[in-house]
Amino acid sequence: MREGRWTRDQLKLAFHLYCQLPFGKLHSRNNEVMQLAGQIGRTPSAVAMKLVNFASLDPAITSTGRKGLDGASALDREIWADFHADWESLALECERLRKQFVADAAVDPMEEETLQGLEIPDDFTGESRRVLTEQRIKQNFFRRAVLASYRGRCCMSGVSEPRLLIASHIVPWKADKANRLNPGNGLCLSAIHDRAFDQGLISLSDDWKVLLSEKLRRSDEPFVESVFKPLEGRTIELPHRFVPEAAFLRRHRSEVFLDNRWAGFA
């Protein structure tokens, strides 16, 4: 194991992992903590301690009375700020850094997980493969960060079956490149709630209450009556970190939500 101060690269990888683990799994017995520790030359206990140091900087955690360990360094704070300033570049950089730390790059289970489900035609060029691989890396990071923040449950329905869950963007992916990978621009939703949100049939107020469009409010379909109407005015289950940012909610209401009744909130 390497000794001495944490390097900037080690801290980037630690924060990258912090974003993707539920708060209750920031401990030395977690397999991903142990794996990262082996890759960067730190003990699992040291990595776990660093993850909890990052938690002490997270306002979504400290505002609820929970806290991490005291003693976050100035460099910890710099890494925190760097990620929040450029999520996309740092997610890709961390993937490259991780590979650099892996002693045997030919056997890399994390790469298989990252590329799982990505079909790349045999005749794709190297550049096309690179673009698709990077896209998959970014999507994987955003999904893991959002689902971990919401404890793996839809914030509206409570469903926890992973195959039904989507890391939904509040401001659409194409509309804001700078915040494509910002977990604060994400909601964990079931497929049906994600579709309704994406199509502007539902939205959220600044205090995270569900808003129904007039189209749904006037519907007498049994499915709408049982699935969507009970949600109106209810506060979503908030994540334990990366709480949805009000600026993103306002943009969703003004740019996506169908109901002009709420235009005044934009």
Image (spheres, rainbow, N blue to C red):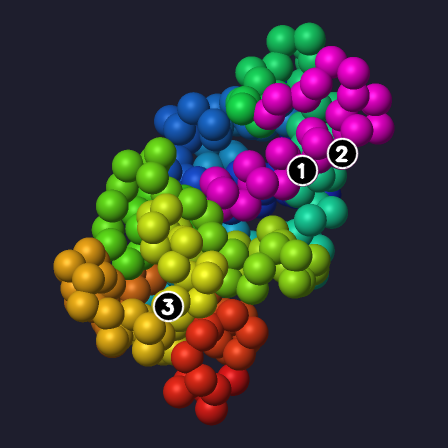
- Is 148 situated left or right of 141 in this image? left
The kind of secondary structure the magenta stretch mainly shows is: helix
User: What number is the disc on residue 200?
Assistant: none
Q: Residue at x 73, y 39 (%)?
A: 93
What amino acid type should be assigned to the residue bearing mark 1?
Gln
Please give the range of residues in magenta.
118-145
Q: Which mark is residue 135?
A: 1
Q: Secondary structure at mark 1?
A: helix
Q: Residue furthest front?
A: 220
Badge 3 marks a residue whose secondary structure is strand
Quarter of the image containing the N terminus?
top right
- Label 2 crowding class (10 Å Cα cut-off): few <14, some 14-19, many 20+? few
Decide: marks 2, 1 in contact (CB < 8 A)?
yes
Under mark 3, the amino acid is Ile
* 257 displayed left or right of 229: right
Measured along the vertical axis of the image, is residue 27 above or below residue 166?
above
Q: Is residue 162 magenta?
A: no
Residue 132 at x, y = what percent? 70, 32
Amino acid type assigned to the residue bearing label 2 in the image: Val
Image coords of residue 14 (percent x, y): 58, 39
Which of the two labelled residues, at mark 3 and mark 1, occupies the earlier sequence position? 1
- Residue at the location (28% across, 37% down)? 161
**Above or below 7: residue 30:** above
Q: Which residue is the site of mark 3?
A: 202
Q: Are marks 3 and 1 in contact (CB under 8 Å)?
A: no
Answer yes or no: do the residues labelled 2 and 3 have beta carbons within 8 Å? Answer: no
What distance separates the C-alpha of mark 2 from that of mark 3?
33 Å
Query: Along the line of sight, which residue is nearer the eye, 208 or 71?
Result: 208
The foreground one among 237 and 266 is: 266
Q: Which residue is mark 2?
A: 131
Q: Nearer the viewer, mark 2 or mark 3?
A: 3
Q: Is residue 85 left or right of residue 61?
A: right
